[in-house]
Image (cartoon, rainbow, N blue to C red):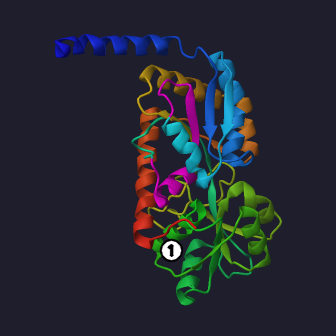
Amino acid sequence: MMWRNLPAACALVMLCATAAAQNYPAKPVRVIVPVGPGGGLDFVARLLAPKLSEALGQTVVIDNRAGASGNIGVELAAQALPDGYTLIFLSASSVVSSVVSKTRFDLVRDFTPVSLTSTLPTVLVVHPALPATSVGELVAYAKANPRKLNYGSTGNGTFLHLAGELFRLSTSIEIVHVPYKSVGAATVDLLAGQIQMNFANLGTVQPHVKAGRLRMLAVTSQRRTRAAPELPTMIEAGVPGLVITQWHGMLAPAAVPRAIVERLQHEIAAILRQPATLARLEESGIDAVASTPQEFAAYLRNDYDKWAGVIRQTGIRLD
């Protein structure tokens, strides 16, 4: 008897979910940001939140949940009800952290991608005393001087550490990783020549490049960036397949109704087309990038597989 009623029960559940999606949102929406206030991820989340509030007709609240390299906030979002009232704003750093850590969540399994929102151009930058004005010259110098070049990061197992390791693996050179506690500390030592090269966000180093204190060699995105169109990509510079992108995007817990995901994606895409939004992002050296949920899902899967491959080859773990 119970099994005879199962189709009717399933139909009722689907009907309720559809009704909830049609009335969405009926109360404030929480967006978890798994880092503290400040920084690129929080900046973009807070830029979009009031505009999304206006579009949805409900308050969108930013909830910063830092800790454990972002994993605390991600786990909280993974455990939330799949009703669209708890969302999460992630970056590529969260993917790296989930790969190098033992977590109780799976970014691919436990979340429904909504949309990419933005990318931060990551550049390879060197101290001007280094006799290399191109990626090819840098690689040749490194091969002639194994383990003589140092690069910095924000710690073992972080995004910038893995970026350096992927470059090392892709070019078959031997360079030495020097972990720091912050981007600022690594930049100070790069400016002083204590380390010779680094991967960094374009916005962080561009003022020093303009002042002649640093030299950019290439951008690591798939295409050249609007913020520095003269800068070649790594692929153009002779390192095939090397694409390292720091991105931001919104996700929802798995099993959120498709209608809610599509509504959110539609509103985010519209916000990212607004001239005022584009101008604020461009001022900060950030590129607006909207996507469909399906495109974001493929992007996330590719990123996860890429960094998992680096971990397998290097055995890197968080401090």
Residue 114 shows in the view: no
Q: Which residue is mark 1?
A: 168
Horizontal and vertical percent position of residue 38: 75, 47
Horizontal and vertical percent position of residue 146: 55, 87
Give left or right: position of 127 versus 121: right
Residue 234, image quadrant: bottom right
Q: Residue at x 51, y 52 (%)?
A: 95
Give left or right: position of 97 versus 132: left
- Which residue type carries mark 1? Arg
Q: Residue furthest right?
A: 211
Above or below 138: residue 106: above
Q: Residues within 10 Å of mark 1 (few under 14, many from 20)?
A: some
Q: How many marks?
A: 1
Instruction: Report the front residue among 288 and 7.
Output: 7
Residue 90 magenta-highlighted? yes
Horizontal and vertical percent position of residue 311: 44, 66
Q: In the rendered structure, which segment of residues is drawn in magenta?
A: 80-104
Q: Residue furthest front?
A: 1
Above or below 293: residue 258: above
Horizontal and vertical percent position of residue 52: 65, 25
Residue 152 magenta-highlighted? no
Residue 12, image quadrant: top left
Instruction: Report the front residue among 3 and 144.
Output: 3
Above or below 136: residue 158: above
Query: Which quadrant does the C terminus fall into?
Result: bottom right
Q: Residue at x 65, y 53 (%)?
A: 229
Query: Which quadrant does the N terminus fall into?
Result: top left
Q: Residue at x 56, y 32 (%)?
A: 87
Residue 67 shows in the view: yes
Q: Secondary structure at mark 1?
A: helix
